[in-house]
Amino acid sequence: MPEESEIKARKPRADSLRNRELLLTTAKTAFAETGADAPLEDIARRAGVGIGTLYRHFPTREALVAAVYARALEQLAQAAEDLLATRPAGEALAAWLELLIDYMATKRVVAPALQADPGEGSRVYATSGATILPALQKLTDTAHAAGDIRCDIGFEDILRMMSGLSQGYERPGWEVGARRLLGVMMDGLRVR
């Protein structure tokens, strides 16, 4: 009979990982459509798994909401590296700021549930800045070093501008205006 430590060290099966990813993707879409209180049975059905599979991965609604949010954070942080590896620095910064708007749209939907969760949700929510800010700092510094953005505009300035763009993010249709203003912002940041 295997030791308990051997069982814990075992890697998840490929189908289990696939189901988890399907559930996270489907939950993110469902939350965006109907809010963080979307029926869990509907999420499981849309992901093509049973409700038991959902509960095996996420024992509570709060755990699912926290996992969707944590995944969005991880993807946003990783996107900075991916974009810098494939695009000029100024373009990478602009593309990442577009993704930041997508992230804010997700945050808008799940933030109330995260803040209400005294456990995992509030912890993930509270540490989100520590994940996002270094990525923005690196993108800004790299764009400066490449000469793609004005040297008199720094990380703090970009952070303030993005804070301004986030005003009203809880309102429907916010993303359209935010993207339009981001275009204006990027035009003003480019070196002439």
Image: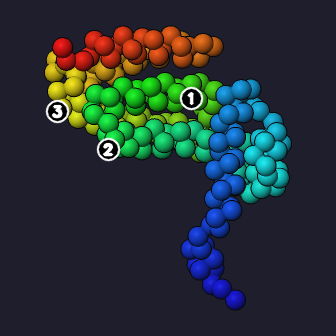
Q: Residues within 10 Å of mark 2 (few under 14, many from 20)?
A: few
Where is residue 152? Give x, y as percent.
16, 17
Secondary element type, mark 2: helix
Q: Going by the image, does 124 lie left or right of 136?
A: right
Say what amino acid the circle numbered 1 marks: Lys
Residue linked to disc 3: 145
Which circle's residue, 1 or 3, is located before the other in the chain?
Answer: 1
Secondary element type, mark 1: helix
Say what amino acid the circle numbered 3 marks: Ala
Residue 5 visible (yes or no): yes
Residue 107: mark:
1
Looking at the image, is 59 positioned above or below residue 139?
below
Frontmost residue, 122 versus 186: 186
Frontmost residue, 147 versus 170: 147
Q: Going by the image, does 83 lie left or right of 172?
A: left
Q: Residue 107: which quarter of the image?
A: top right
Q: CA–CA distance between discs 3 and 2?
A: 15 Å
Q: Residue 33: which quarter of the image?
A: top right
Residue linked to disc 2: 85
Q: CA–CA distance between discs 1 and 2?
A: 27 Å
Where is residue 102? Give x, y as percent.
52, 27
Which circle's residue, 1 or 2, is located before the other in the chain?
Answer: 2
Mark whose residue sits in front, 3 or 2: 2
Looking at the image, is 102 positioned above or below residue 153?
below
Q: Residues within 10 Å of mark 1 (few under 14, many from 20)?
A: many
Looking at the image, is 11 positioned above or below residue 83?
below
